[in-house]
Image (cartoon, rainbow, N blue to C red):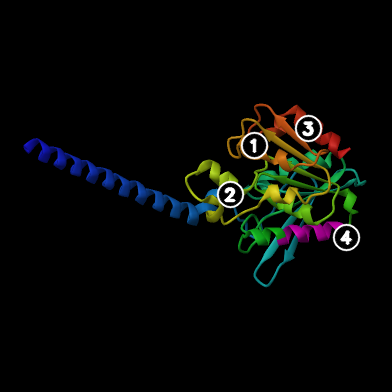
C-alpha cells in the first residue's frame, strides 16, 4: 500500500512537471509568435531615411525625380544615365530591403555600360520617399515608374529588374504590364514561404503582413524571365527560390551560381556574362 501511494504521488508530481513545462513552452510560443507578427516589418526591412535636401553624390551621371503623391508624401526616383547619348532602353530596378538607393547605386553600371538608363525608385521610408510602406503602395508606385518610362521608351525597350525584396514588386509589375524581359536576382517564392523556412512552427500564411507571391505573379508573366540565385544564399535560401522553377515557362531561365551568396552575385563572372548577353 505504501509503495502504491508513493508511486501515485510520484506520477502526480511527474504530471505536474510535464504540465508546467507545457505551459512554459506554450507561453514562449505565443509570445514569440506575437513578436514575429508585430515586429516582422522591422525584421524584414531596414530603411534609412534622408532629408529632402540631402545631396546624392554618385559617380554615374544621374538625375533625381521627385513626385508629390499628395500634400504630405514624396516619391523619389533616381535615374542613372549611360555616358553615350544613344539609349537602348531603360531598366526599372526595384532594389532590396536595406538602406535606400545609395546602397544599390553601384549596380547601375551593370546596365549603363550597355547603353541603358537605370531608374531606381525608393520605397516609402527609404531615402527621400515618404509615407507608409505597404505592399499595395509598393505596387502603386512601381506602376507609376512604368507609366513614366512608357512615355519615353517603347515597351520592348523596358526591362524590369528585381533584387531580393524587390523581386516581388518587379514580378507583380511584369504580370500586369508589357516589357522586354523580367530579371530577378535572389528572389523568394513568397514572403510567407520565406518566413515558413525560418519559423516552420507558425502559421506564416496568416501571420505575414507582406505576401509578395512571386510564384503567383510569374504565372501571369508572358515575357521571358531570367532568375539568378546562389547556392549558398544565407538570407533567401536556395531551396526557397528553387521552387520557382515549377512556374517558369519552357523558355525561361533559372541560373544557379555555385557558392554564390545573397550579396555577392555581382562578383561572379557567369553573372556578368549572362547579364551582358541579355542586354545585347
Mark 2 Cα shell of 10 Å, populated few (<14), some (14-19), many (≥20): many
Q: Is residue 183 left or right of residue 166?
A: right
**What number is the disc on residue 83?**
none
Badge 2 vs badge 4, beta-carbon distance below 8 Å: no
Mark 3 Cα shell of 10 Å, populated few (<14), some (14-19), many (≥20): some
Mark 1 Cα shell of 10 Å, populated few (<14), some (14-19), many (≥20): some
The answer to which of 9 and 82 lies nearer the viewer is: 9
Badge 2 vs badge 1, beta-carbon distance below 8 Å: no
Q: Circle 2 sits in a helix, a strand or a loop, which is it?
A: helix
Q: Where, by quadrant of the figure, is residue 184 drawn?
A: top right
Range of residues picked out in magenta:
140-151
* Residue 149 is one of the magenta-drawn residues: yes
The residues bearing labels 3 and 4 have C-alpha atoms spaced at a distance of 29 Å
The residues bearing labels 2 and 1 have C-alpha atoms spaced at a distance of 22 Å
Q: Residue at position x 15%, y 41% from top?
A: 8
Q: Residue at position x 86%, y 58% from top?
A: 150
Q: Residue furthest bottom?
A: 71
The residue that mark 3 highlights is: 272
Q: Residue at position x 15%, y 38% from top?
A: 7
Q: Circle 3 sits in a helix, a strand or a loop, which is it?
A: helix
Give the image location of residue 57, x and y in percent.
71, 48
The residue that mark 4 highlights is: 151
Badge 3 vs badge 4, beta-carbon distance below 8 Å: no
Amino acid at each position: 500500500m505504501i509503495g502504491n501511494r508513493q508511486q501515485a504521488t510520484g506520477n502526480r508530481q511527474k504530471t505536474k512537471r510535464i504540465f508546467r513545462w507545457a505551459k512554459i513552452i506554450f507561453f514562449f510560443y505565443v509570445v514569440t509568435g506575437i513578436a514575429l507578427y508585430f515586429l516582422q516589418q522591422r525584421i524584414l526591412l531596414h530603411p534609412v531615411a534622408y532629408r529632402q535636401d540631402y545631396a546624392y553624390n554618385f559617380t554615374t551621371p544621374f538625375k533625381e525625380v521627385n513626385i508629390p503623391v499628395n500634400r504630405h508624401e514624396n516619391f523619389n526616383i533616381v535615374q542613372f544615365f549611360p555616358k553615350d547619348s544613344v539609349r537602348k532602353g531603360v531598366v526599372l530596378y526595384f532594389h532590396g530591403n536595406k538602406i535606400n538607393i545609395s546602397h544599390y547605386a553601384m549596380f547601375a553600371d551593370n546596365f549603363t555600360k550597355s547603353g541603358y538608363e537605370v531608374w531606381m525608385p525608393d520605397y516609402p521610408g527609404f531615402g527621400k520617399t515618404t509615407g507608409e510602406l505597404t505592399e499595395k503602395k509598393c505596387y502603386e508606385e512601381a506602376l507609376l515608374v512604368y507609366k513614366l518610362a512608357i512615355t519615353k521608351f517603347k515597351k520592348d525597350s523596358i526591362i524590369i529588374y528585381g533584387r531580393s525584396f524587390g523581386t516581388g514588386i518587379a514580378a507583380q509589375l511584369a504580370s500586369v504590364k508589357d516589357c522586354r524581359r523580367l530579371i530577378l536576382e535572389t528572389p523568394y517564392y513568397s514572403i510567407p514561404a520565406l518566413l515558413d523556412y525560418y519559423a516552420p512552427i507558425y502559421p506564416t500564411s496568416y501571420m505575414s503582413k507582406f505576401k509578395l507571391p512571386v510564384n503567383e505573379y510569374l504565372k501571369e508573366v508572358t515575357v521571358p524571365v531570367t532568375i539568378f540565385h546562389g547556392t549558398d544564399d544565407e538570407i533567401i535560401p536556395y531551396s526557397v527560390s528553387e521552387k520557382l522553377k515549377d512556374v517558369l515557362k519552357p523558355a525561361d531561365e533559372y541560373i544557379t551560381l555555385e557558392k554564390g551568396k545573397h550579396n555577392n552575385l555581382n562578383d561572379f563572372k557567369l553573372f556578368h556574362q549572362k547579364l551582358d548577353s541579355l542586354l545585347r
